[in-house]
Amino acid sequence: MSTPSGSRTDRLQWDRPPTEPVPAEPPPDAGGRGGLVAIVVVAALALVAAGLAALFTGGGDSGGEAADDCRGAECGAGPSQGLEPQEMEIPDDRLGVRSLGALTPVPPDGWTQYRGPGADELLAEDAHALSVSHTDTWISYMMVGRLGEFALEADPEDLHGTATEIVDTWVFDYPYSSATGVARSEPELTDTVVDSHPAVLLETRVTWDSLENSPDTYEDVALLLVDPGQDGIFLGVAAVPESGTQRFEPAVEALLATTFRHNTFLP
């Protein structure tokens, strides 16, 4: 294809109850039984006070000083660690769409960085693209991104219709605008599954009578639409002209090997 353009979380003080000193001998008017009862009561109170003091100073309940403040489902759960989002890493051998948590393998045989990640590209946002140069202005092109321009029209229940609309816009409004006699073959639409998500693969061949700065007479185009269920549609494109025809099938296979859910939350 011709080089595309786009920018797009008080300690409770226990006061021991006042007690009368216990005399060494009971008073003359006190019976032996009454004196014994007084001693027992004082001893019991002392034990209770000691036990509660231990409780509120951490000697009994591991909750410590926070025990009287603990409320709700998180009581006793310890300090909240909180979760922070971690930006998705995109390895050198992958194309990535962070907004969808998607990673796509880079095909073999000469593909190099073209734009992104996170770029605005043809028909997509948060895009990541590769290319292979055939001339100064003529390339093979591979791109993954979040479907942008047609986001409001993309229907996850009708990926076939969306794919057909996109390919017509691609063919007749974008890379081949300087060509004469542009035509495309009847699109071949294949229902498939990509990393357990419903998807549609569209393949077509674009031909022309003449195209400025191109030594070729046709280009094979594949569009992959995937609904990963994250309020966005994944778009993958492979556009490989006659000059690089051997790269087309590996590029399509790479698109179909896309995986999702790579955005993670770590403590």
Image (tube, grey):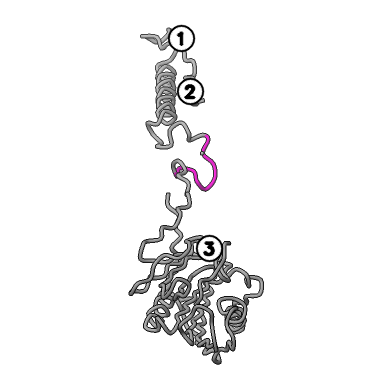
Residue matched to label 3: 126
Q: Residues within 10 Å of mark 2 (few under 14, many from 20)?
A: few
* N-term mark: 3 or 2: 2
> Callout 2: helix, strand or loop?
loop
Residue at 43% x, 78% y is 256
Majority secondary structure of magenta residues: loop
Q: Amino acid at mark 3?
A: Asp
- The Cα atoms of the two marked residues, 3 and 1, are separated by 96 Å
Residue matched to label 1: 29
Front position among marks 2 and 1 = 2
- The Cα atoms of the two marked residues, 3 and 2, are separated by 62 Å
Above or below for 216 versus 91? below
Residue matched to label 2: 14
Q: Which stretch did the figure color magenta?
A: 69-77
Q: Nearer the viewer, residue 62 or 200?
A: 200
Extreme residue in the left direction: 109
